[in-house]
């Protein structure tokens, strides 16, 4: 039976470190601010944004929410981002995705100052990740690395397989594993022999978006299995991309859903916001 990697435990440790540093900075008169912009009435986005607000309270940041109407124009949203770029009390800016169809997400993201881009979605920050010289890491892949580190398994030289090639998860995930000298394969919907490739993975990261996509016959005995998926099953219950009940019988380590990667994504946003504030104040 696999060891369960607890996102609850690891994220609490990460947030506690942020909280302690934030408290110490507060004693020096430094206040840290995160602005979160949500546009429209997407239910899932509302849940995520509320979670981020609670995390800010927990670690001691000031959080400012901007809830804009569904029919907000791109010009209006960009004007708000520009105002927040110039606001010295705000160190991190997050525009919750997806945005309504009349707005070009790329244009909005690339308006965020790279120094306040705590999602690390801006093209400049994405480029910095490629060359391994970064201020921010995207929250989900960074959180996955924390979970892998918590197992004590060394990535160096391991066969690492990432299923999914999104800009937010799959691609940066592969880069972070590569930076730690993993031998990385990215799989996607056109991949041939997916099962064989996955079966060879010492570290398998699933970011597909389909419930029970990773079955037990795709997993090597003793592998570290990280489930980034966030799906609803037939009964409407939250579940990941991995068939947890079966895969946990052969994996060495596995993350649950819920209680795994999702909590780490939130915790790493707090880390990035702290780092953004430290950069702003020139604190090492
Ligand atoms: N929507 C779903 N996940 C995310 C995320 O990590 N950041 C932003 N900005 N929007 C999201």
Image (cartoon, rainbow, N blue to C red):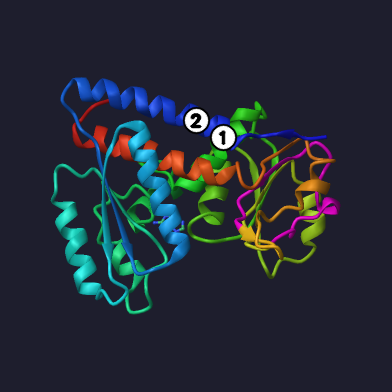
What secondary structure is the magenta-colored segment mainly?
A: loop
Q: Residue 249, which numbered label?
A: none
Q: What is the CA distance from the residue labelled 1 to the residue labelled 2?
A: 6 Å
Figure quarter occupied by ligand 1 = bottom left
Residue topped by disc 2: 12
Above or below, 77 relative to 183: below
Q: Secondary structure at mark 1?
A: helix
Q: Secondary structure at mark 2?
A: helix
Question: Which residue is the extreme one toward the front?
Answer: 235
- In this image, 170 relative to 272: left or right? right
Task: Examine the structure image and report whether residue 220 is included in the region drawn in magenta.
Answer: yes
Q: Tell me which residue sits at (60%, 42%) in the image.
A: 260
Q: Tell me which residue sits at (45%, 64%) in the image.
A: 43
Residue 202 appears in the rendering: yes
Q: Tell me which residue sits at (36%, 50%) in the image.
A: 125
Towards the viewer: 129 or 227: 227
Which x, y percent locates residue 5?
A: 66, 34
Quadrant in which residue 102 is drawn: bottom left
Towards the viewer: 233 or 141: 233
Residue 178 appears in the rendering: no
Residue topped by disc 1: 8
Residues drawn in magenta: 211-230
Q: Residues within 10 Å of mark 2 (few under 14, many from 20)?
A: some
Which x, y percent locates residue 59?
A: 35, 32
Which x, y percent locates residue 253?
A: 73, 36
Towards the viewer: 125 or 7: 7
């Amino acid at each position: 039976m696999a060891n369960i990697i607890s996102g609850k435990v690891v994220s609490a440790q990460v947030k506690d470190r942020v909280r302690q540093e934030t408290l110490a900075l507060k004693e020096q008169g430094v206040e840290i601010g995160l602005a979160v912009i949500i546009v429209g009435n997407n239910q899932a986005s509302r849940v995520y944004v509320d979670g981020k607000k609670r995390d800010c309270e927990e670690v001691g940041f000031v959080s400012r929410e901007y809830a804009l109407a569904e029919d907000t124009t791109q010009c209006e949203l960009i004007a708000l981002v520009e105002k927040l770029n110039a606001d010295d009390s705000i160190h991190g800016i997050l525009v919750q995705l997806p945005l309504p169809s009349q707005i070009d997400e790329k244009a909005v993201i690339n308006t965020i100052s790279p120094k306040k881009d705590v999602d690390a979605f801006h093209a400049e920050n994405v480029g910095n990740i490629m060359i391994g010289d970064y201020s921010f890491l995207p929250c989900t892949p960074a959180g996955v690395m924390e979970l892998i580190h918590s197992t004590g398994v060394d990535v160096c030289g391991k066969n690492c397989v990432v299923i999914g090639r999104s800009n937010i998860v799959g691609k940066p995930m592969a880069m972070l594993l590569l930076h730690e000298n993993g031998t990385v394969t990215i799989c996607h919907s056109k991949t041939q022999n997916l099962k064989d490739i996955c079966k060879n993975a010492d570290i398998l990261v699933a970011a597909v978006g389909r419930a029970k996509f990773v079955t037990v016959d795709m997993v090597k005995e003793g592998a570290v299995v990280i489930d980034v998926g966030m799906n609803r099953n037939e009964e409407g219950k939250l579940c990941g991309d991995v068939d947890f009940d079966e895969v946990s019988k052969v994996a060495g380590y596995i993350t649950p859903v819920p209680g795994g990667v999702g909590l780490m994504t939130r915790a790493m946003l707090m880390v990035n916001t702290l780092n953004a504030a430290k950069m702003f104040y020139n604190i090492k």
